[in-house]
Image (tube, coloured by chain):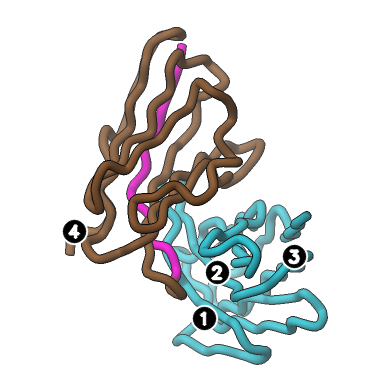
């Protein structure tokens, strides 16, 4: 099992540009989570899906953020337009009910 | 609301024992997890408690008291590679599968 796969590992973009982060969960896992981590705020949940359906998106900062899960093996987190305060490490994680999370390696986003 | 507290930083010596505490107030409880995160890497699962008591896993043990909203992670025979952040996470029954993570405790192991 390759684990949770995220791409890209690093992204540097200019303010105002669209950014798309990608995640492939572990096969068979029915929950997928998007977290953001910063020094100031730690790990914050943005949104999570169960069986490809968004369950809780209350952590999405604002309308500039959107997430989709078109099938069980792929999810995207999009920021449009991006701002410098969006700079953070974005983690995707997947799990089976009652189990702990398995995190991807993260995408380090820098918006300049 | 939810609140999870951990000490910000701790320092210990190689070979020693260290206890990292976590206190929580959550609406609903369905398990407490500990994760280890090395700098620049993803968090990795260490332990899980859903019932009161001690769970032992090699050099690492985790304890839970639900009535006190308290857990600790015990690391024995510390090694330099144990220098990392340790995150406490609570799964609240009212939040489905969602975890809320504490701020993390940065542990430095000195020679």
Query: Image point 57% across, 77% down: which residue?
Result: B75
Magenta range is A100-112
Callout 3–callout 2 Cβ contact below 8 Å = no
Residue bearing the label numbered 1: B60
Give how far apart the Cα atoms at labels 3 and 2 are: 19 Å
> Residue A77: horizontal and vertical position, in percent?
38, 33
Q: Which residue is mark 2?
A: B34
Chain designation of label 4: A
Task: Let me know if marks 3 and 4 both belong to one chain.
Answer: no
Q: Which mark is residue B27?
A: 3
Residue on which disc 4 sits: A2
Residues under labels 4 and 2: Cα distance? 22 Å
CB atoms of marks 2 and 1 within 8 Å? yes
- Label 4, secondary structure: give it: loop
Tell me which label, 2 or 1, sits earlier in the chain. 2
Write down the chain letter for disc 1.
B
Q: Is residue A109 magenta?
A: yes
User: Callout 1: helix, strand or loop?
Assistant: strand
Query: Which residue occupies 60% across, 41% down?
Result: A58
Residue B108: name its quadrant: bottom right
**Quick check: is A21 in the magenta stretch?**
no
Mark 3 and mark 1 lie on one chain; the one further toward the N terminus is 3
In the image, residue A38 lies at what x, y percent? 57, 37
């Amino acid at each position: 099992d390759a684990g949770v796969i995220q791409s890209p590992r690093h992204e540097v973009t200019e303010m105002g540009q669209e950014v798309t982060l990608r995640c492939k969960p572990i096969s068979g896992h029915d929950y997928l989570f998007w977290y953001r981590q910063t020094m100031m705020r730690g790990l914050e949940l943005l949104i999570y899906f169960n069986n490809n359906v968004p369950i809780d998106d209350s952590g999405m900062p604002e309308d500039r953020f959107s997430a989709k899960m078109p099938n069980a093996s792929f999810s995207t987190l999009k920021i449009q337009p991006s701002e410098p305060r969006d700079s953070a490490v974005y983690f995707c994680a997947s799990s089976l009910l009652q189990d702990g999370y398995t995190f991807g390696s993260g995408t380090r986003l820098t918006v300049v | 609301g939810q609140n999870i507290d951990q000490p910000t930083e701790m320092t210990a010596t190689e070979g020693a024992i260290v206890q990292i505490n976590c206190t929580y107030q959550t609406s609903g409880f369905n398990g407490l997890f500990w994760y280890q995160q090395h700098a620049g890497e993803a968090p990795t699962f260490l332990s899980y408690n859903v019932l009161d008591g001690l769970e032992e896993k090699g050099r690492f043990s985790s304890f839970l008291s639900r009535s006190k909203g308290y857990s600790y992670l015990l690391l024995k025979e510390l090694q330099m590679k144990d220098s990392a952040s340790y995150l406490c996470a609570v799964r609240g029954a009212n939040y489905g599968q969602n975890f809320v993570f504490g701020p993390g405790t940065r542990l430095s192991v000195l020679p």
